[in-house]
Image: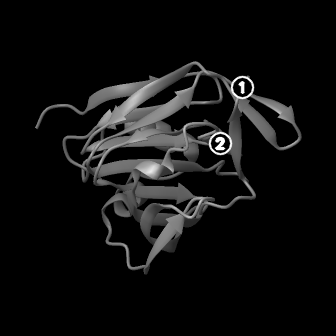
Amino acid sequence: MGEDELVFEKKEQGEPALVIKLKDKKDLSDPRITNILMDVGISIETFTQLLNMPVKGTSKETFNSRGVKIEDVVQEIINTPMGKAEIADVMLYKNAVAGQDDMALHLKVGQTKGFEAIYVEEGEALLGFPKTVDPVAPGVYAASKQRDEILLTPGTLAIIPAPTANGWSKTGEGFKFRYICQPPWNSTFVKPAIDAV
């Protein structure tokens, strides 16, 4: 089968991320994957199950503040050994990228800290990681203009532990992905990171 291919690794203290092209999404034995999952407190077995199980939720549409559709989502909240997790199958549209203030970060929650993961099924998109994110006021963060822009293609898995900021920079036609978020996405701990001036 060969090895999984490293696409991007962010090693900044306290803000790690791993983007890797998988040979087989049922085989997550790559040590880089096992290490980052161990750091966020989820077992390989549980994560593999979340990545591969069918989502039984109902489909819903999400719109931006201008009323333009940005995604179709089938979402389910399930219980795992480390608490509730969200799994979703997402079709992301081009209008999901606003062109400014597109970054967000998950604050660490509880003992498990939390994470999000993206596995690309179809299409391509650019996922941006700002070089730095700084608090500028209580609950307000600013993301640097310097970014690592990572091309996500089918078979690419991104694992992003809290509080590593990220955001979509560009989405192509027909971009579909599996999204995993533990704990389930919530605006109480997912905070926007505005563009630094």
Name which residue type carries label 2. Leu
Horizontal side of residue 135 vs 169, given as left or right: right
- Identify which residue is drawn at 32% across, 68% down: 53
Residue 10 can be seen in this image: no
* Farthest residue, direction left: 1
Locate the N terminus and report the quarter of the image it occupies. top left
Amino acid on which disc 1 is placed: Ala
Mark 1 or 2 closer to N-term? Answer: 2
Q: Quadrant of the C terminus?
A: top right
Q: Secondary structure at mark 1?
A: loop
Residue 165, image x, y percentages? 61, 36
Whole-percent x and y of residue 25?
Answer: 25, 50
Secondary structure under tag 2 reads: strand
Q: Residue furthest right?
A: 138
Asked if 112 appears above or below 68 in the picture, the reply is: above
Q: Which residue appears at 32% of the width and 27% of the height?
A: 6
Horizontally, residue 136 falls left or right of residue 80, namely: right
- Residue at 47 percent of width and 71 percent of height: 61
Gap in Å between the C-alphas at discs 1 and 2?
15 Å
Residue, x 44% and y 33% (percent of image)? 18
- Mark 2 neighbour class, 10 Å CA radius: few under 14, some 14 to 19, many 20 or more: many
Is 59 placed left or right of 140 in the picture?
Answer: left
Provide the residue designation for mark 2: 105
Front one among 21 and 187? 187
In the image, 89: left or right of 197?
left
The answer to whether the residue labelled 1 contacts the one labelled 2, judged by CB atoms less than 8 Å apart, is no
> Which residue is disc 1 drawn over?
196
